[in-house]
């Protein structure tokens, strides 16, 4: 490059100086050597960062992400099972993708849809937030009902896209989520992964599907957070979440509204109030109270400040299922196509509760009578871990627009749960729902 520098009268010409020429060559070789050295260093760092062995990585793997790499799907036999499960077998039936199908609510909703002749395909990642064997038992129950549950993660966009290519679902019942208020303090990332990123991933698949399905999904009564006005109405403020779980569900409602507005997706959010019943979740109070009372263990019963009461609007699973099916049946079609909105789309939010809050201490008394065992009680202050003092649903909107009418009181519902629990855990795990 030095030959392009012009010579100046009265000064030496740089290209004719052997000293300058040799010095320039030395600098050039030195630069090449430095560049080569740092290139090897950079490539080495990339190799260490991306290709280091799993055994040398001290960071524990997030259980919520496991199925992204471990599930198997695809192939003619798999597609045949998917189509068969999703095939509509009744006049005016619908074809529904149920996410979280091996979960508590998902199992009951999938069974109810299948029994009335709708096409149902389940999806679940079978994570280990609680005993996976219970989820597998629910899967076996669904299989006997004719519902195929595919194993996969809602964050896997390729997997979701394949499902919508194989089946033109008319509806999606989105129940997959990271549940639990207290667990958020131990594993906060799992809530963002499932309840926010997972929801966005699903909505992306739905807005690009042709036809776009109508979507009904599970929000939560926890969005009311620190709201002191009771009963909770859909018009009440929801900007004071008391837990990360509540915050992710509130964020989900805002995200759903965005996809409704931009892409024309028909979306209905259902705010569930403390669902209980057979095949329930082991992390729920009624479930582990039953387990611990039978084992003779002490159970902790929380009370609010100044000996204030703690109450929940316990809602039996069969009533929740009726609300879910009513929401699916009244959902209007999405208005978009190919990811583009063609008109305003339906957007709804409903409370699904029982409207009869019960003191947690009264819940324990009912269990004592049903189990014929006295509980060892330890009354303690409500911890600052995201739990709220009370929940109470105003269900007038759901009654008016969905025909929702809960009919199971806590005594009756717990009797059915206890019968299932004793049969499942004491009878070789062969209980029916």
Image: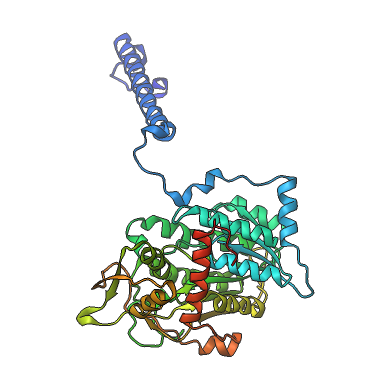
Give the camera-side residue of 294 and 31.
Answer: 294
Residue ID at (22%, 81%)? 307
Give the camera-side residue of 44 and 387.
Answer: 387
Q: Work out which residue is located at the far left of the displayed protein and give it.
A: 306
Confirm whether residue 209 shows in the render. Answer: no
**Which image quadrant is residue 228 in?**
bottom left
232 to the left or right of 26 = right
Q: Work out which residue is located at the far top of the displayed protein and give it.
A: 18
376 to the left or right of 64 = left
Residue 379 on image: x %, y %: 25, 73
Residue ID at (42%, 59%)? 192
Residue ID at (66%, 52%)? 162
Q: Quadrant of the C terminus?
A: bottom right
Confirm whether residue 405 shows in the render. Answer: yes
Q: Is residue 165 above or below residue 236?
A: above
Give the camera-side residue of 143 and 399.
Answer: 143
Give the camera-side residue of 107 and 328.
Answer: 107
Q: Quadrant of the N terminus?
A: top left
Q: How many marks?
A: 0
Q: Is residue 290 above or below residue 17?
A: below
Residue 186 on image: x %, y %: 33, 56
Residue 366 on image: x %, y %: 40, 78
Residue ID at (49%, 62%)? 177
Q: Work out which residue is located at the far front of the displayed protein and give it.
A: 372
Residue 125 on image: x %, y %: 54, 53
Give the color scheme: rainbow, by chain, secondary structure or one colour: rainbow
């Amino acid at each position: 490059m030095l030959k392009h520098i012009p010579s100046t009268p009265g000064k030496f010409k740089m290209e004719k100086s052997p000293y300058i020429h040799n010095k320039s060559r030395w600098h050039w070789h030195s630069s090449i050597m430095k560049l080569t050295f740092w290139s090897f260093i950079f490539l080495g760092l990339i190799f260490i960062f991306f290709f280091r062995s799993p055994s040398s990585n001290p960071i524990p793997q997030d259980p919520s992400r496991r199925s992204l790499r471990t599930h198997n799907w695809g192939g003619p036999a798999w597609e045949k099972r998917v189509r068969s499960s999703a095939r509509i077998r009744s006049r005016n039936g619908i074809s529904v993708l149920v996410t979280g199908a091996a979960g508590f609510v998902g199992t009951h909703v999938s069974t109810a849809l299948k029994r009335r002749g709708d096409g149902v395909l389940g999806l679940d990642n079978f994570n280990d937030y609680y005993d996976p064997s219970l989820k597998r038992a629910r899967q076996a129950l669904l299989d006997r009902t004719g519902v195929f549950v595919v194993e996969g993660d809602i964050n896997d966009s390729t997997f979701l896209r394949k499902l919508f290519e194989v089946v033109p679902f008319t509806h999606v019942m989105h129940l997959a989520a990271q549940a639990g208020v207290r667990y958020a303090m131990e594993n906060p990332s799992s809530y963002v992964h499932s309840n926010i990123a997972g929801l966005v991933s699903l909505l992306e698949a739905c807005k690009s599907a042709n036809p776009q399905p109508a979507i009904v999904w599970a929000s939560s009564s926890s969005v009311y957070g620190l709201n002191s006005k009771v009963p909770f109405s859909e018009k009440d403020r929801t900007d004071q979440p008391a837990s990360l779980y509540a915050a992710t569900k509130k964020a989900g409602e805002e995200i759903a509204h965005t996809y409704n507005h931009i892409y024309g997706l028909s979306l209905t959010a259902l705010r569930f109030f403390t669902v209980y019943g057979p095949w329930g979740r082991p992390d729920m109070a009624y479930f582990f109270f039953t387990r611990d009372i039978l084992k003779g263990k002490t159970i902790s019963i929380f009370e609010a400040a100044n000996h204030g009461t703690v109450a929940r609007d316990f809602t039996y699973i069969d009533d929740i299922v009726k609300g879910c099916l009513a929401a699916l049946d009244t959902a209007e079609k999405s208005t978009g196509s190919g990811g583009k909105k063609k008109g305003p789309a339906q957007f709804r939010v409903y409370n699904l509760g029982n409207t009869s809050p019960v003191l947690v201490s009264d819940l324990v008394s009912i269990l004592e009578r049903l189990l014929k065992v006295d509980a060892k009680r330890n009354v303690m202050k409500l911890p600052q871990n995201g739990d709220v003092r009370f929940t109470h649903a105003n269900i007038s909107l759901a009654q008016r627009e969905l025909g929702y009418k809960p009919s199971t009181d806590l005594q009756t519902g717990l009797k059915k749960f206890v019968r299932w629990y004793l049969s499942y855990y004491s009878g070789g795990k062969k209980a029916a729902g």
